[in-house]
Image (cartoon, rainbow, N blue to C red):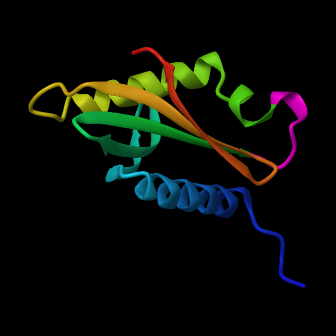
Amino acid sequence: MPPPQDKRELGRMAEDAALAYLLLQGLKLVERNFLCKGGELDLIMRDGTSVVFIEVRQRSRGAFGGALASITQPKQRRLTRAAQTWLLTQKSLPPCRFDAIVIDGGRMEWLKNILDM
């Protein structure tokens, strides 16, 4: 019997699955796991001319509202701060949006434009 996987490994597997799915949808990877003092962005991708900041959340069960409910107000503020920090490194300000890939009980869903910047 294989040893139980830790949360980081499970998170990495969820991000891998989300990335593969989004690449199949035509998005292009810009950066993965952008980390700054304000927070972290799981995936930064391009969808045409737009930059998409993608949060990947996974829950094995729907208890406590499922994966989407885990993107709380404090988490949203950290995502926004991290995106603003990343945007400071760009020569020009592209159109942007925040999306989420939520995985509940193995079912993946892509939610677009989940919060305003």
Measured as percent of width and height from the top left, residue 59 is found at: 78, 45
Compared to 67, does 19 lie above or below? below
User: Residue at image x 43%, y 51%?
Assistant: 25
Tell me if 3 is positioned left or right of 26 in this view: right
Q: Quadrant of residue 106?
A: bottom right
Quadrant location of the N terminus in the rendered image: bottom right
Tell me if 22 is positioned left or right of 69 in this view: left
Measured as percent of width and height from the top left, residue 39 is found at: 47, 33
Quadrant location of the C terminus in the rendered image: top left
Q: Quadrant of residue 100?
A: top right
User: Residue at image x 87%, y 44%?
Assistant: 61
Q: Quadrant of residue 35?
A: top left
Measured as percent of width and height from the top left, residue 56 is found at: 58, 44
Outermost residue, front direction? Answer: 25
Residues 52 and 70: in front is 52
- Is residue 60 inside the magenta stretch? yes
What residue range appears in magenta?
59-65
User: Residue at image x 20%, y 28%?
Assistant: 94
**Marker count (numbered):** 0
User: Residue at image x 73%, y 36%?
Assistant: 67
Residues 11 and 18: in front is 18
